[in-house]
Image (tube, rainbow, N blue to C red):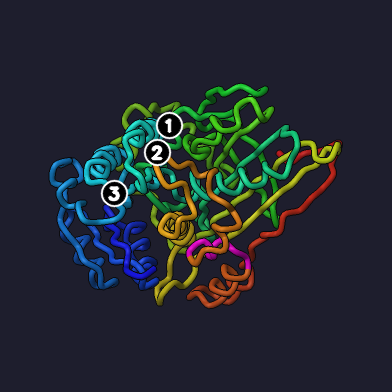
């Protein structure tokens, strides 16, 4: 790049600050972080020398004015502010990226994208799930002549669970509640359908640890629409340690806390501590026909908390921020569609992993950084990423 690209990041919280950090240290981006919370902006400036501005995400007029003259805006705020930010981006003629898992928000942004100018794209769902998991699954699907089953499993888990939920908060509480309460998309017998959140409980083992997985909303992004009629079964489930789903189903459904999400958020944030000592598990397995044979392909990765630019980052910080920065960087270098709505499955996995930010998902880079992180030697020795794709012909079994 001959000159720095100018990017506004809306949200000075954990993920917004991480995105600002990565872009700043790349030395190729001029970064402006916006938030209505002055204290959050001040904390950010002590960590990363970027520009800041006080802005209210609900004021479309002021956002449009602030966005003029910039190249792109990234929304790292809660899902319910994204539509206003995207509308202001459209009016200002700049590209838009976000991390939302909310299906209605994504659909609204998709409609806005119809008015995009040449060179202006709208790309929601750019995190881990939705985000990277869709890029991975789509690339793997391309290896098959005929698709039977696509199973996508993702979890952000504490390394040292110590409560009954076997869970610690690692990212947005609003997003977590959305996933546990909203309807979930899936494909069953070739047709798009909806399934209940917290339903579809299953168990599986990886590296000697038994996990559970269950339906949650939003993780598939637009993949259901892309693959409808092309795959027999497709579903996405969140991974947790055993026992978590039982307690959350009692809280969310039996006690009807899904009808009072404000109270549910207060309970979660007052009783469940956050942690930086986490691990992100990504597991995608696909079964179908290839060259006339029934074949199963699996791809599994574990990414741990690690040191990034002198700070200890949680695994969910690393994976979420790196994924968004990677697709933003690919857009900057002309490696994505150049106008309108862009889906995650339009991203090349090879180019994503070759990107300087996408490399955080690669085995060698992830492992080397994790070994240097400020975590115990015992934990560091356990860091691994299973990044190879294993081709197995399995006629009589499949992973559940």
Residue at position x 44%, y 72% from top? 308
Q: Which numbered disc flags the more N-terminal residue, 3 or 2? A: 3
Residue at position x 34%, y 26% from top? 259
Labelled pair 3, 2 in contact (Cβ < 8 Å): no
Figure quadrant of the N terminus? bottom left
Q: Is residue 162 magenta?
A: no
Residue identified by numbered label 2? 177
Q: Residue 327: give x, y in percent of width and height.
A: 45, 54
Camera-side residue: 373 or 134? 134
Q: Residue 246: give x, y in percent of width and height.
A: 54, 36
Q: SS of the residue at dot 1?
A: helix
Residue identified by numbered label 1? 181
Q: SS of the residue at dot 2?
A: helix
Tell us which disc is closer to us: 1 or 3: 3
Residue identified by numbered label 3? 94
Magenta region, main secondary structure? helix
**114 in relation to 21, above or below:** above
């Amino acid at each position: 790049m001959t000159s720095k690209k100018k990017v506004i990041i809306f949200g000075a919280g954990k993920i917004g600050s991480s995105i600002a950090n990565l872009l700043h240290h790349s030395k190729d981006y001029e970064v402006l972080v916006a938030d209505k919370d002055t204290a959050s902006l001040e904390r950010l400036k002590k960590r990363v020398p970027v520009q800041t501005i006080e802005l209210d995400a609900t004021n479309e007029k002021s956002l449009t004015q602030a966005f003029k003259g910039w190249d792109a805006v990234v929304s790292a705020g809660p899902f319910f502010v994204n539509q206003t930010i995207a509308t202001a981006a459209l009016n200002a003629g700049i590209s838009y990226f976000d991390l939302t898992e909310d299906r209605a928000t994504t659909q609204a942004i998709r409609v806005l994208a119809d008015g995009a100018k040449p060179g202006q794209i709208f790309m929601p769902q750019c995190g881990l799930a939705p985000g990277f998991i869709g890029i991975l699954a789509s690339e793997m699907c391309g290896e098959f002549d005929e698709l039977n089953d696509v199973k996508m499993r993702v979890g952000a888990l504490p390394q040292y669970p110590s409560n009954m939920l076997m869970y610690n908060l690692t990212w947005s509480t609003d997003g977590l509640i959305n996933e546990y309460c909203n309807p979930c998309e899936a494909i069953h017998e070739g047709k798009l359908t909806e399934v209940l959140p917290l339903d579809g409980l299953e168990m599986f083992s990886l590296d000697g640890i038994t996990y559970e997985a269950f339906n949650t909303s939003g993780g598939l992004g637009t993949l259901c629409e892309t693959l409808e009629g092309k795959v027999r079964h497709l579903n996405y489930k969140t991974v947790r340690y055993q026992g978590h789903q039982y307690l959350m189903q009692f809280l969310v459904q039996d006690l009807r806390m899904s009808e009072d999400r404000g109270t549910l958020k207060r309970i979660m944030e007052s009783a469940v501590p956050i942690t930086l000592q986490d691990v992100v598990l990504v597991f995608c397995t696909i079964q179908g026909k290839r060259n006339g044979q029934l074949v199963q392909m699996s791809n599994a990765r574990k990414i741990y908390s690690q040191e990034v630019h002198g700070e200890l980052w949680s695994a969910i910080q690393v994976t979420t921020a790196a994924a968004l920065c990677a697709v933003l960087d690919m857009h900057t270098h002309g490696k994505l569609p150049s106008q309108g709505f862009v889906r995650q499955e339009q991203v090349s996995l090879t180019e994503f992993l070759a990107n300087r930010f996408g490399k955080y998902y690669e085995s060698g880079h992830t492992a080397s950084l994790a070994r240097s992180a400020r975590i115990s030697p015992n934990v560091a020795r356990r860091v691994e990423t299973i990044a190879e794709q294993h081709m197995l012909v399995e006629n009589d079994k499949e992973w559940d």
